[in-house]
Amino acid sequence: MPAQAGYQNLETFQKQKLRQKLRKLNNIETDPRYFWTPSSSPRLSPRTNRMTRMCGKELIMHNKAPLWNESSQVYQLDFGGRVTQESAKNFQIEFNGKQVMQFGRIDSNAYTLDFQYPFTAIQAFAVALANVTQRLK
């Protein structure tokens, strides 16, 4: 009960618990047991995100290269029927030779996003959103 622990109300109790969690997270970020340091791993760059440091590995992914279609004289990607319209925003991402994400246009104002491990929903959405907004310039 918050009142028994010396908190004025539920709001101050929740704020205090949040501060404790943030301090713990900051300690994890600086604790060498949770990530490789640059001296132990020359591949770790300053731009590497916190999760990569905590896991101790980087995931290298690539855009899938389109194949040339002789009959239509254009480069194409096979979306397995999930994407129905051509767009410069359509893309597929591969990890270890396996397709793990695809994003493409299905209507004038609608897109489809398919993903699997190692992407989470928020990560896949962020990549797709970054791709769309980059092409708006």
Image: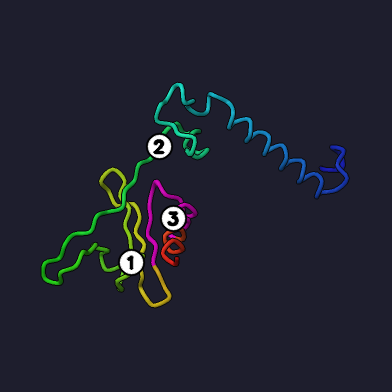
Is the image coloured rainbow, by chain, by secondary structure, or in one colour? rainbow
Q: Position of residue 106 (x, y in %)?
A: 35, 73
Amino acid type shown at disc 1? Ala
Gap between marks 3 and 1 measured at Cα: 15 Å
Q: Which residue is mark 1?
A: 88
Is disc 2 surrounded by few (<14), some (14 to 19) or many (20+) residues within 10 Å? few
What is the span of residues highlighted in magenta in the rendered image?
Answer: 112-128
**Measured along the vertical axis of the image, is residue 122 above or below residue 78?**
above
> Quick one: label 1 or label 2, which is nearer the N terminus?
2
**Measured along the vertical axis of the image, is residue 78 above or below residue 15?**
below
Residue at the outermost left position? 70
> Quick one: label 3 or label 2, which is nearer the N terminus?
2
Contact flag, marks 3 and 1 (Cβ < 8 Å)? no
Quadrant placement of the C terminus:
bottom left
Quadrant placement of the N terminus:
top right
Identify the mark at residue 58; answer none if there is no mark. Answer: 2
Amino acid type shown at disc 2? Glu
Identify the mark at residue 127; answer none if there is no mark. Answer: 3
Pick the front one: 90 or 22: 90
Gap between marks 1 and 2 measured at Cα: 28 Å
Q: Residue at x 40, y 69 (%)?
A: 111
Identify the mark at residue 96; answer none if there is no mark. Answer: none
Instruction: Check disc 2 and report its element: helix, strand or loop.
Output: loop
Amino acid type shown at disc 3? Val
